[in-house]
Image (cartoon, rainbow, N blue to C red):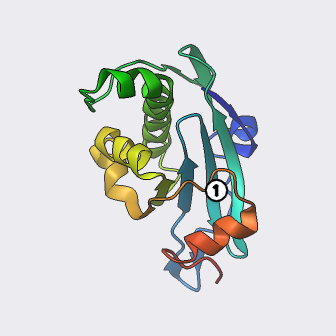
Amino acid sequence: MKITGKLAEGGFHTFDTDPKTHQGHKIPRTWAVIADGKKALVYRKTDSGLELIADAEWGGSTIEPFDGHFFKISEGGKGHDSDPHNKKQNHGGMIFIHGLVEWLDMADKEHVFDNLVLVAEPHTLGYLRKNLSSNVNARVTAELDKDLTKLSLKEIEKHLGQVIPLKS
């Protein structure tokens, strides 16, 4: 899995200097992960809408460094698919999703988001749900079972606006 974007350039703590409170109230740091079996877009909620902070793409099952962490995209996972044709067809995508889950777990351990919104087509969303750690799963505040990976930012904001407030 290859990760590019602001988080790849500056690490998990890139946005640590952003205000954490407004008029005495804590501002939750919300991330939205929009994924399919080969790509994931990670956005953060800002005062003006969404900002793309990371773009992850399937790059094979190799050891990849990220922000001082090393992790192997393994073929393991908690899910089970008894249909051999379906398993063969989706194998690479599920390995990618497993790597994304591991990356989200690392981000959670670094305490860089408070809320997480998951967006993926139903099969991928189900696989994400099954494989998230209990800590990351506890941060999931909304889900949308649609593939939005190929849409523009404006279209993504329109869809996400249905499940979370985007503009302050």
- Would you identify the image quadrant in which residue 1 lies? top right
Which residue, given by chain and number where applicable, does mark 1 sit on? 43
Residue 48: x percent and y percent?
Answer: 73, 75
Asked whether, in this view, residue 132 is left or right of residue 22, the answer is left
Residue 131: x percent and y percent?
Answer: 33, 38
Residue furthest top as drawn: 62
Residue at x 47% of width, y 56% of height: 118
Quadrant for the C terminus in the image: bottom right
Residue at x 44% of width, y 59% of height: 145
Residue 36: x percent and y percent?
Answer: 54, 43
Residue 157: x percent and y percent?
Answer: 66, 70
Taking depth in this image into account, of 157 and 36 the one nearest to the observer is 36
Tell me if mark 1 has few (under 14), some (14-19) or many (20+) residues whose alpha carbon lies within 10 angstroms of its own.
Answer: many
Asked whether, in this view, residue 43 is left or right of residue 26, the answer is right
Taking depth in this image into account, of 81 and 42 the one nearest to the observer is 81
Disc 1 marks which amino acid?
Tyr
In the rendered image of this protein, does residue 69 appear above or below residue 48? above
Taking depth in this image into account, of 21 and 89 the one nearest to the observer is 89
In the rendered image of this protein, does residue 160 appear above or below residue 152? below
Taking depth in this image into account, of 61 and 106 the one nearest to the observer is 61
Residue at x 76% of width, y 36% of height: 9
Residue at x 58% of width, y 34% of height: 38
**Count of all numbered marks drawn on residues in the image:** 1
Asked whether, in this view, residue 133 is left or right of residue 21, the answer is left
Q: Secondary structure at mark 1?
A: strand
In the rendered image of this protein, does residue 140 appear above or below residue 103? below
In the rendered image of this protein, does residue 158 appear above or below residue 116? below
Residue furthest front as drawn: 85
